[in-house]
Image (cartoon, rainbow, N blue to C red):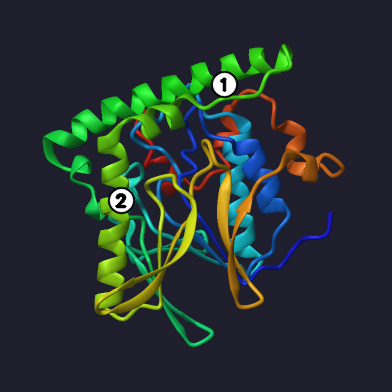
Amino acid sequence: MTRREPKVVVISDTHLGTYGCHAKELLQYLDSIKPEILVLNGDIIDIWNFKVRYFPQSHTDVLRKILKMASQGVTVFYIPGNHDEKIREYIGLHLGGIKIVEKLILKIDNKKYWIFHGDVFDATTRGTAKLIAKLGGKGYDLLIWLNHIINKTLLFFGKEKMSFSKKVKSGVKKAVAWINNFEQTAIDLAIENHYDYVICGHIHQPQIRECTNQHGSTTYLNSGDWIENLTTLEYDQKAWSIYHYEKSKFLASVPKEFKSANKEPNQEALSEIPESIYELMPI
């Protein structure tokens, strides 16, 4: 497979270390691109729900792949989110060629970009509400695992897959209102500060849309996630697009890193992750 070369790629909410993460698919995607800039926009490693007994080889391989990309000249920025907030202790440092930053202000093709994860707008990630959110995260992980088992059964009988979590979110008015408020807050602040684009993650809702209020306009983008949507944002030929992973595109070419993707985690593989990253994971 010929590697595509988008100028900028933004990935968020991969939640490595959880049952719902599509690490194998993410590894295939990463192997298919060679961007100038790769932005890891939060919740890459799910430290909230991390279990040392569950970190498969494919999850380790994703980290190794990102480090390899950084060593080969790709400029990699890591903006921690709420699920990997522990990494915020390292803001300002370079780790294996990866620049850890709180937020990112970029100028690309004479346009000004404001890139951040988005949990700063979320009251449920702080104080007592944070404990409830962590418990909810574990429940969400269980829901995704059950959904995976049920979807295998549905596919066996020739039925279409379904998403429990999407149905729950779309059926709860408070969740819909919260997402709308999140997006509007980001949009209003971007316009107020004269950013041409604002790029977020956090809410697992891939989107690109032009937004206007009485003070001006901006373009709001969200990279989605690698739990349900399997999406990233790509900037190429002076235009942004949402990349949706499609398994059929990768059937003809399987990267070398995939040879061990189905193996269980082992200590030798984990030892290849830089110690400073591994220590962030509570055991």
Q: Secondary structure at mark 2?
A: helix
Q: Secondary structure at mark 1?
A: helix
What residue is rendered at 64% in x and 67% in y? 35
Q: Where 32 sits versus 197, above or below? A: above
Circle count: 2
What residue is rendered at 29% in x and 75% in y? 191
Q: Specify the label residue 176 is tagged with.
A: none
Residue 255 visible in rendering: no
Residue 195 falls in which quadrant of the image?
bottom left
Q: Where 210 sits versus 250, above or below? A: below
What residue is rendered at 20% in x and 40% in y? 124
Residue 47 in picture, x, y percent from top left: 37, 37
Which three-letter amino acid code belongs to the residue tagged 2? Asn
From the image, tell me which residue sits under label 2: 180
From the image, tell me which residue sits under label 1: 148
Q: Where 175 sits versus 20, above or below? A: below
Q: Residues within 10 Å of mark 2 (few under 14, many from 20)?
A: few
Which three-letter amino acid code belongs to the residue tagged 1? His
Closer-to-camera residue (76/213): 213
Which residue ends up furthest to the bottom in the rendered image? 110
